Image: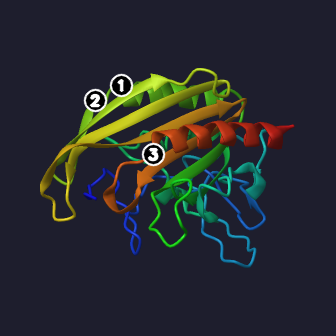
Amino acid sequence: MSRHTPPPTIRAPRMLAIVLPLLGTVALGSACTADDAGTDAVSSTATPTTATATPSQTDQPSASASAPTTIPTSAFVELPAELRKSSRRTTPVAEALPKLCGNEFGTGGRQVTASAAMTVTYKKAGEPDTNVPQGMIHQTIFTFDGDGAVAYLQRLRDAVQACPSYDQGGNPVAVKSRAMPGVGDDALLVSRTWAATSLNGERTGGDASSQIAVARVDGVVTVFDDQGWEGTSGNPDILDRTVRDGVRTIDAWQR
């Protein structure tokens, strides 16, 4: 099986950390809490803990924020057993959010009231647990005050349209986007395609790809970033299922 180098390279022993400005203060153990908009989320250990990021002076939520400031772990999607390589785990938001030409996915602004992220690792259905994973999906959740969620999706659409391609390690990555009908109140699917290469960076022929899905449920926005394991392509079918399950999970949390 050929190996490929994706835009955000994922390796089992080490992951590429993408540093983005974060916009919510988060506490994650059995729940994630933010009182002000900070720079990122903080990983929890197996024992539930509470950690608070230092808020920035420019990206704090408005004092009149009425949106939830707590994001429970139960608001995040969990994969079905047949696809689950490992259970969801807390991830710093700065590592979970994707990056294309710039800070497209980290532009929540002052209306963000909380943010948190978790990662799930998946396998192909029917494969033994001894096989390597097929990939991982980072899920980030933002809660917004007022019309912040709607504004975020519009800014994101504009930013993605302004980024038809970008350079990743000397390799061009093509970017395309389209709507995802029937997913939440609004949803966007972003596809990244690049020339497939081996682990040594040699062209192997053909293309590799991965996808990012962003969905809004009322005043909540969730971002799913699918990344193939060890440089392979992501799995669009598993991502689609995960996004739809994730939207239903968020909807149930809000009720």
Residue depicted at 67% across the width and 53% down the height: 80
Name the residue that disc number 2 marks: 164
Marks 3 & 2, CB-CB < 8 Å contact: no
Name the residue that disc number 1 marks: 161
Q: Is residue 216 left or right of residue 206?
A: right
Query: Which one is nearer the viewer's eye here, 73 or 13?
Result: 13
Name the residue that disc number 3 marks: 235
Q: Is residue 174 left or right of residue 65?
A: left
Q: Quadrant of residue 87?
A: bottom right
Of pointers 3 and 1, the one earlier in the residue sequence: 1
Image quarter where the N terminus lies is bottom left
Of pointers 3 and 2, the one earlier in the residue sequence: 2
Residue depicted at 13% across the width and 52% down the height: 203
Marks 2 & 1, CB-CB < 8 Å contact: yes
Q: Tag 2: residue type?
A: Pro
Q: Tag 3: residue type?
A: Asn
Across and down, in percent, residue 211 comes to 43, 40
Across and down, in percent, residue 252 comes to 82, 40
Q: Tag 1: residue type?
A: Gln
Badge 1 marks a residue whose secondary structure is helix
Image quarter where the C terminus lies is top right
Badge 3 marks a residue whose secondary structure is loop
In the rendered view, tell whether residue 6 sits above or below residue 190.
below
| Label 2 environment density (alpha carbons within 10 Å; few <14, some 14–19, many ≥20) | some
Badge 2 marks a residue whose secondary structure is loop
Q: Is residue 68 left or right of residue 170?
A: right
